[in-house]
Amino acid sequence: MQRLSTKEYKNNFVNTFDGDESGDLQPRQTPEVLYSKAVPTTVSEPALLAWSDDLARELGVEKPKSGEDIDILAGNHITPTMYPYAACYAGHQFGNWAGQLGDGRAITLGEWENENGNFWELQLKGAGPTPYSRRADGRAVLRSSVREYLMSEAMHYLGVPTTRALSLVTTGDQVLRDMFYNGNPAYEQGAIVMRVAPGFLRFGNFEMLASRKETDHLKKLTDWTIERFYPHIQGDNKVLDWFKEVVERTAALMVEWMRVGFVHGVMNTDNMSVLGLTIDYGPFSFLDDYDLNFTPNTTDLPGRRYAFGNQAGIARWNLRCLASAIAPLFPETDELIKVLQAYDAVFLKKYHNMMAAKLGLDGVKEGDTALFGRFEETLSAVKPDMTIFYQLLMELPAGVAGEQEVLNHFAGSFYDEPEGTEREAFYSLIKAYQERISANTCSREEALDKMKKANPRFILRNYLLHQAIEELEKGKDELFVKLQEAIKDPYSKNHDEFFAKRPSWATKKAGCSMLSCSS
Ligand code: AMP
Ligand code: MG
């Protein structure tokens, strides 16, 4: 185990690429560089609120005991081997080219190499302004920091690729936020999360260089990305093979989000990781009731571009932006376009396998894709609680036959008991499912085993986060600590005190279903 303050940090990105070394934090355009030096701005009273023991063990980081180590997590102390910087990237936001964005409130301190020779980038979120902060303050509030800290770790334990969170500190400073963008700004507690990932490169890092026509930089960044994060890719077609793998990983990520019912909420190209990780936790949500049109982001209304059921298509749209960005690296782009066009097939294959696992099927057989379609359609109409529905599906006894009997079995998942045609559709779906299951060639135990691994029982619902945050703001951490434990084994029954539908008081309450981007 090593201490944060005595560790020798590596700075491979900074040493490889051109950067603005001035340390000037004034907002500005930064042509011809891939990053700008940005020293965190000190905070008044850092206090460690949460620490991820499992992640720390993986990294070989000792839990901070001294002020100096906590100061690192708050941006108050920079060690001699750290080189703090903000990355320069661009992006398409809500379908429109937004030009330069960059790390406006994220500062990378350095790269941590663990005992196995794996590198992890350590990044503070909310550590003060950078040249990319534009008109904002570079800070983060407790509310959004708790959400990112818990949710990124929750996704990890669910088995979904994601950036991680090592620590959460409160800063002792107040941050002004207009939470609802309605002209009522209020002060909130400031906080900083230390995020950890092999890398935080986004589609937007490549789009930035392409838009500035800095083809040498673009080539260098692409080669570096492949060498560092995709070392198994070798040969003459490296860039194409790499893009193919980004397509694969992105499709896999979308399928994983659909498996657990995760809605990101802001799938702009600057929030898309080239490593296929879930990145930038903002107005995200798990589905409570199954609704393909659900978007948790108030800024995403009325278009619902980033609704649950649109995510796979938006990922394709974003991949097209990445393909356009790297197109200058190809003498002709036919092959690149073919790889992009293969996305739908890649996605569908993964999606079908995922659905087969969720439903406990012995594979994807003839007629199964139609059955998956019926599940999607009927669940969208009936809108049961997604997580509870799949748990009850696992518990469905083979003998349940009559309509009322079936409806009673699933009663605990309904927000509204289905009636009329919806009731009929639901019943006939379950009958079709029972028939399909009875044709399984694998044992019931094997099928159940598959289902248990594919269907989480505990999900970090927004209303739970909301309650935990309200408590923390009053200085109580009971629920927060419970949630920190519950996220660690989401497939077990060990945390069944949280196995419940979203309560009705939370249905329309801000922060419980819809959220703003303000953070
Ligand atoms: P997001 O939608 O959170 O991914 O943010 C989009 C852009 O706005 C990124 O460039 C962020 O760094 C920047 N940004 C968001 N919030 C802040 C803030 N409080 N201070 C500075 N920059 C911010
Ligand atoms: Mg972002």
Image: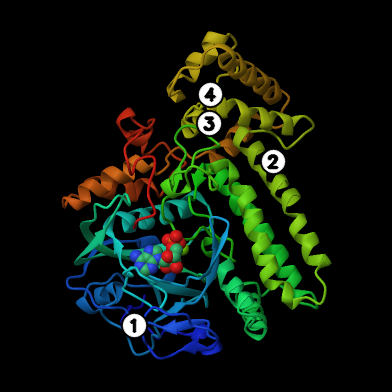
Neighbours of disc 1 within 10 Å: few (<14), some (14-19), many (20+)? many
Tell me which label, 1 or 4, sits earlier in the chain.
Answer: 1
Residue at label 1? 39
> Which of the 4 image quarters holds residue 452?
top right
Tell me which label, 2 or 1, sits earlier in the chain.
Answer: 1
CA distance for labels 1 and 3: 48 Å
CA distance for labels 4 and 2: 22 Å
Tell me which label, 1 or 3, sits earlier in the chain.
Answer: 1
CA distance for labels 2 and 1: 47 Å
In the rendered image, residue 131, in percent from the top left (x then y), is placed at 40, 79
Quadrant occupied by the C terminus: bottom left
Residue at label 2? 352
Tell me which label, 3 or 2, sits earlier in the chain.
Answer: 2
Q: Is residue 32 above or below residue 229?
A: below
Q: Amino acid at mark 2?
A: His
Residue at label 4? 382
Neighbours of disc 4 within 10 Å: few (<14), some (14-19), many (20+)? many
Q: Amino acid at mark 3?
A: Tyr
Q: Is residue 110 visible?
A: no
Neighbours of disc 2 within 10 Å: few (<14), some (14-19), many (20+)? some
